Amino acid sequence: MQNHLNDEFVFRYKLVGSVEYIKSGKDQLFLSKMVKICCIGAGYVGGPTMAVIALKCPNIQVAVVDISTARINAWNSDTLPIYEPGLDEVVKKCRGKNLSFSTDVEKHVAESDIVFVSVNTPTKTQGLGAGKAADLTYWESAARMIADVAKSNKIVVEKSTVPVKTAEAIEKILTHNSKGINFSILSNPEFLAEGTAISDLLNPDRVLIGGRETPEGKKAIETLRDVYAHWVPVDRILCTNLWSAELSKLAANAFLAQRISSVNAMSALCEATGADVSQVAHAVGKDTRIGPKFLNASVGFGGSCFQKDILNLVYICECNGIPEVATYWKQVIKVNDYQKTRFVNRIVSSMFNTVSGKKIAVLGFAFKKDTGDTRETPAIDVCKGLIGDKAKLSIYDPQVNQDQIQRDLSMKKFDWDHPVHLQPMSPTSVKDVSVVWDAYTATKDAHGICILTEWDEFKNLDYQKIFNDMQKPAFVFDGRNVVDAEKLRKIGFIVYSIGKPLDDWLKDMPAVA
Ligand code: NAD
Ligand code: UGA
């Protein structure tokens, strides 16, 4: 194709299957043929990631497909299936132009040059590696389907988080069923965090692309790199071999979770000694080698990935004959479980060693603020612990509804990480749990309040009014250190804040985990 634009501003990119386009300095794109991307899995990763690709690459057609009709219908409606700041605007800008959502998985896969796979990779609950290993059922069925329907060469991109060496297995499935079609496998793990997904995608610290070190592999890497280069500076696009990319994702999540378990371990020691975990974290984080981020002590980390990915890492270490390394990482999960148990025990022991029949208001159920996601939220274990001691819970979260909370409290461990329609149907609702739509209703007549998500609105509630309407003594157990404890103590509350010097009341009633 001839380049008619000023050379200074023009770069030539080669895209899949000899598709060529020219990119001007003003990001104007001229295509000889439309490139098509398809993403299998319209979840928290697939939806936002593809929406941003569509926004930044107007020349590329992006189809997001899923086996869940309900999910796809929601993506096509005014109420998107996930709550994520900024997502609505991006989807509304692109949907109906170069972004579509569909259940016609096979059609879109067949038509695409690049196929991302962003399906669930839950922890196995049965058989070999149960409780640790990743269950690749959904990945395998997606790979088999790609091989079945493909009529042209394709780049297949691992977007899901997978065990290291998964690409080898996928390659085998694809090549054994290929009918002469060439498939190039890339690993392109996603590092977005929920609640900040759109800004993380628009301005990523890095994009990681791993591929085979063969001419075809290198060409595939370049092709995907050129997609991201529409908006990500090239020096932030890291290209590695396949195994490094796969392992880097597990390693990054393990390092992040380890920081939280480290600060949470310190929080227990702070409570025992009178030190203040915020002051300790601040002092430690001032060391530029350590840095200040991700050092907020909490009731424990949650979310769909930290625990799952570390368990997966532990299993891989065990399978590779390095149990010492497996034990090291397992401890990150153990400390997280300890922190949740410690929190429940603190509540029960502070309230005269029983919460039986007492109303406890739970403020926040999502695993972090600015998301409605409850997967592996610490709130599940805390609520189950309190229910185990016969408390009556009144739960309020600005983004999580009653149905979701009831499902979460009655579902078995790890069952949540399957496509919605394959999860256990209509679980029995948990007695002694009511879900309400504001913090004042939740706390009325309560004996105690647990803050389990750091929603901003919990900082500015009218705590005097809340105190007036509660049973006395009135307790606040702040699992996120969001309230002004001194102010609340002046009102009359007994306050427990994670890792902070204890009220005399709490000192007299030590909690043993
Ligand atoms: P999700 O459950 O929100 O979405 C997965 C989707 O895949 C579901 O809608 C499901 O119906 C669909 N699906 C499953 N099998 C399918 C098939 N064969 N064909 C078509 N659709 C199918 O999960 P998620 O949070 O988007 O995570 C996806 C992957 O990305 C996981 O491996 C996860 O570890 C990883 N990841 C997640 C995050 C995150 O913040 N949630 C961040 C980085 C990486
Ligand atoms: C995390 C990683 O941050 C992402 O890079 C990664 O892509 C993603 O997992 C994934 O693979 O799924 P996410 O789980 O969405 O993202 O959210 P985080 O901000 O990491 O928070 C995880 C949990 O740790 C939350 O429960 C949060 O409240 C808790 N946390 C976080 C703390 O308790 N203290 C902190 O200082 C930070």
Image: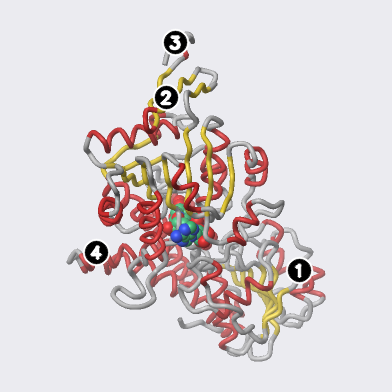
The circle on residue 20 is: 2
Report the residue at 50% width, 18% height from top.
24
- Which label lies toward us, 3 or 4? 3
CB atoms of marks 3 and 4 within 8 Å:
no
Asked if labels 3 and 2 touch by Cβ distance under 8 angstroms, the answer is no
Looking at the picture, which amino acid does disc 1 mark?
Trp
Location of mark 3 (residue): 8
- The alpha-carbon separation of the residues under discs 3 and 1 comes to 58 Å
* Towards the viewer: 209 or 212: 212
Alpha carbons under labels 2 and 3: distance apart = 19 Å
SS class, disc 3:
helix
Q: Is residue 128 left or right of residue 305?
A: left
- Mark sitting on residue 437: 1
Relative to residue 300, is residue 504 drawn left or right? right
Residue type (three-letter) at the residue carrying disc 2: Glu
| Residue 397 sits above or below residue 109 on the image | below
Residue in front for this viewpoint, 299 or 436: 436
Q: What residue type is labelled 4?
A: Cys
